[in-house]
Image (cartoon, rainbow, N blue to C red):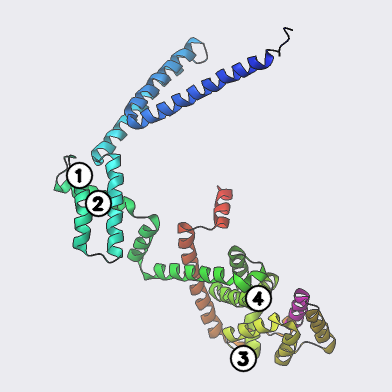
């Protein structure tokens, strides 16, 4: 009957085909230009120079810029080109091996290191890798001195920033290494404690660090001691993170009131708060402060599995019954305690600074981005 579909759709399809082909052509041109710039960076710099000069001429012709601005552009473009040429010449003079030779050399040196670490005999490694390394330098025109210089440069490039940092710390002194090792060990302990049964506390390592930092002043304990307490709380599997700060603050006063060292006092508090139903009788026998009605309430809450409520009531009765640990020591004892805490915190701060510089946490990276 001579009736057919409209040609509008086919026209749009045809236009789309041409647009796709144009985009593909532009993409191919960009990729080609990028590859040529890698192969011949000086040629790419020359092409950029020509483009900048032509652009300046077109703009002054259109009246968009003045003749003075055109002259300044003509002067600036060659200056940038000269700087690029000098930089490329410096690179060429400093490394006469091609990129693929440097990459291959890195692979061979890595194989040598792995072989030595696995206990292979040096002569075996020399027989396996020596000929391959020699082939890399064959035809490069480098003498013995040049070969050694290139080897040193490539090996230096293989050293990771962390390895270089540790080597630098060793040169500075043992204190920095001790601080760094103490910090990473403490952080690993927190990570392990937050897994398994400690997961019930719902705490992250960053949260624990912040709680420890904020509680040390009120509790007059070192950051390291505060973290040790947190590990003990986590391992109980029954103390919520909301109680950590209060318990850290109270631990030293509890130790003074019961005549115990801080570690023993922390263990006792952990047991009491992990099981408030029994813990209220333990604490009442130690420091008092709980009447019959309060003890019954805590036991009832614990029986109803309301650990948070029971622990809060337990702490409310404990805090007023404690004495200030500072009042039980002499002025000399307080001074020594302050010095010891300050020294411990200084070592901890040094170790954390090194750790943050080498392996920042996600929270630290976020804070750094915010400050930037």
Q: Does label 3 or label 4 sit earlier along the sequence?
A: 4
Q: Does label 4 or label 2 sit earlier along the sequence?
A: 2
Question: Callout 2 environment at 10 Å: few (<14), some (14 to 19), or many (20+)?
Answer: few
Q: Residue at x 79, y 87 (%)?
A: 290
Q: Position of residue 31 (x, y in %)?
A: 43, 29
**Disc 1 secondary structure class:** helix
Q: Nearer the viewer, mark 3 or mark 4?
A: 4
Q: Position of residue 95 (x, y in %)?
A: 25, 41
- The numbered mark at residue 188 is none
Q: CA distance from mark 4 to mark 2?
A: 53 Å
Residue at label 4?
237
Query: Range of the magenta residues?
Result: 305-318
Q: Quadrant of residue 50?
A: top left
Q: Position of residue 93 (x, y in %)?
A: 24, 38
Residue at label 1?
137
Q: Does label 2 or label 3 sit earlier along the sequence?
A: 2
Q: Nearer the viewer, mark 1 or mark 2?
A: 1
Q: CA distance from mark 4 to mark 1?
A: 62 Å
| Direction from residue 280 to residue 116 in the image, left or right | left
Residue at label 3?
259
């Amino acid at each position: 009957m001579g009736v057919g579909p409209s040609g509008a759709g086919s026209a749009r399809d045809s236009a789309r085909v041409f647009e796709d082909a144009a985009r593909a052509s532009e993409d191919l041109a960009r990729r080609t230009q990028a590859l040529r710039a890698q192969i011949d960076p000086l040629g790419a710099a020359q092409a950029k120079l020509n483009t900048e000069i032509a652009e300046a001429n077109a703009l002054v012709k259109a009246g968009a810029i003045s003749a003075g601005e055109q002259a300044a552009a003509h002067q600036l473009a060659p200056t940038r080109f000269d700087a690029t040429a000098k930089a490329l010449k410096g690179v060429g003079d400093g490394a006469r091996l091609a990129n693929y030779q440097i990459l291959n050399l890195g692979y061979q040196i890595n194989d040598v290191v792995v072989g030595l670490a696995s206990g292979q005999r040096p002569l075996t490694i020399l027989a396996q890798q020596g000929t391959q390394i020699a082939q890399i330098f064959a035809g490069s025109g480098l003498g013995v001195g040049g070969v050694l210089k290139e080897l040193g440069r490539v090996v230096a490039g293989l050293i990771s920033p962390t390895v270089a940092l540790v080597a630098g710390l060793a040169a500075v002194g043992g204190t920095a290494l001790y601080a760094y090792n103490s910090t990473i060990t403490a952080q690993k302990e927190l990570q392990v404690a937050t897994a398994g049964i400690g997961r019930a506390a719902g705490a992250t390592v960053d949260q624990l660090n912040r709680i420890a930092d904020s509680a040390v002043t009120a509790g007059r304990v070192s950051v390291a001691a505060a973290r040790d307490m947190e590990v003990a709380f986590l391992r109980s599997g029954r103390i919520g993170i909301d109680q950590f700060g209060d318990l850290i603050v109270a631990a030293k006063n509890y130790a003074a009131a019961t005549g115990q060292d801080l570690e023993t006092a922390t263990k006792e508090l952990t047991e009491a708060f992990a099981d408030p139903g029994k813990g209220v009788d333990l604490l009442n026998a130690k420091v008092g402060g709980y009447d019959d009605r309060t003890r019954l309430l805590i036991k009832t809450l614990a029986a109803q599995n309301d650990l948070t409520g029971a622990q809060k009531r337990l702490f409310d009765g404990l805090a007023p019954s404690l004495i200030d640990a500072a009042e039980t020591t002499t002025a000399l004892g307080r001074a020594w305690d302050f010095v010891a805490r300050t020294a411990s915190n200084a070592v901890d701060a040094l170790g954390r600074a090194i750790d943050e510089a080498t392996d920042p946490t996600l929270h630290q990276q976020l804070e750094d981005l915010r400050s930037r």
